Amino acid sequence: MSSISLEPAGHTAAPLAATAAPESPLRAILRRVLHVAVPLATLVVVLLVWQFYVTAYEVPRYILPGPMEVIRAFLADYPMLFSALWVTLSITFSALALALAGGVLVAIAFAQSPWLERILYPYAVVLQVTPIVAIAPLLIIYAPSTHAVLLMCAFLVAFFPILSNMTQGLKSTDHNLLNLFDIYHATAWQRLRYVKLPGALPYFATGLRIGGGLALIGSVVAEFTAGSAGTESGLAFRILEAGRRLNVPRLFAALLLITATGVTIFFLTSFISHLLLRRWHESALTREN
């Protein structure tokens, strides 16, 4: 008759972890280089295939310009494109700052007063689920300027993810810590400052990353919907203008500029998240084995 081992699973796993060889420095450097080189090599291959296709099949530039055509359009129009980028960035970061301040403050109010959350949270959900293209015409009527319309649209898109994540973070505080603070008769401000806010930082970081991207999307969609002209023209207006003029290379250049801006915002917010969490949270710590 075969016997059944009563040893716990961790008893056999520990020797395996102890015998695992540490990664050599050269192997670690190679892994990091490949982490960057592989996506860049993929991009180069895609651009080469793109250029070969439009050259070999003589595709007209008003249908699909090649990468070299897009680069030439970017170099020729960069003063206009960067001026439009500045407008889009100013709306995006202004809306993100307002959404961060509003989302955090409202989430704190919800955490301190459950009744306030029951009353107001459904209206926040209503704003989130209503498409921004449906709200923009109303805002055009009541807002004092086009810039205010763009700012409000981008704010509404970025506000809810920050509010939702921050509210969830403040409600996820360890109950044992809260009980300990109650034993020592801590005030509501002390519980908020020393327990709830530090515990909600990972949720805030997630809301920041999502809100950063959505603020850019909101500003671009708002400009498509509300429109703008003159000195308030952003990249979305330049895309519409280039499409109407069949200047497809400039359209691609503006589109790639928006994409690069979104990627930059994502890395910037991810870096801020790393700075906030790198010393204590499991998601930012490096494993030792």
Image: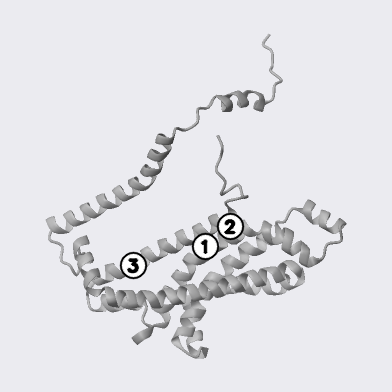
- What residue sits 50% from the left and 27% below the top? 21
Which residue type carries mark 1?
Ile
Res 41 label: none
Q: Which residue is mark 3?
A: 257
User: Which of the two marks, 1 or 2, is nearer to us in this view?
Assistant: 2
Kindly state the secondary structure of the residue where label 1 is placed.
helix
Which residue type carries mark 3?
Leu
Q: Identify the mark nearer the N-term, 3 or 2.
A: 3
Quadrant location of the N terminus in the rendered image:
top right
User: Which of the two marks, 1 or 3, is nearer to us in this view?
Assistant: 3
Foreground residue among 189 and 263: 189
Kindly state the secondary structure of the residue where label 2 is placed.
helix
Category of crowding for the residue at label 1, using alpha-carbon neighbours closer than 10 angstroms: few (below 14), some (14–19), many (at least 20): some
Gap in Å between the C-alphas at discs 1 and 3? 20 Å
Q: Which residue is mark 1?
A: 210
- What residue sits 72% from the left and 70% below the top? 118
Q: Tell me where residue 58 appears, x and y as whole percent.
A: 12, 61
Q: Which residue is mark 2?
A: 276
User: Which of the two marks, 3 or 2, is nearer to us in this view?
Assistant: 2
Q: Identify the mark nearer the N-term, 1 or 3.
A: 1
Q: Is residue 228 visible?
A: no
Q: Tell me where residue 199 appears, x and y as whole percent.
A: 68, 56
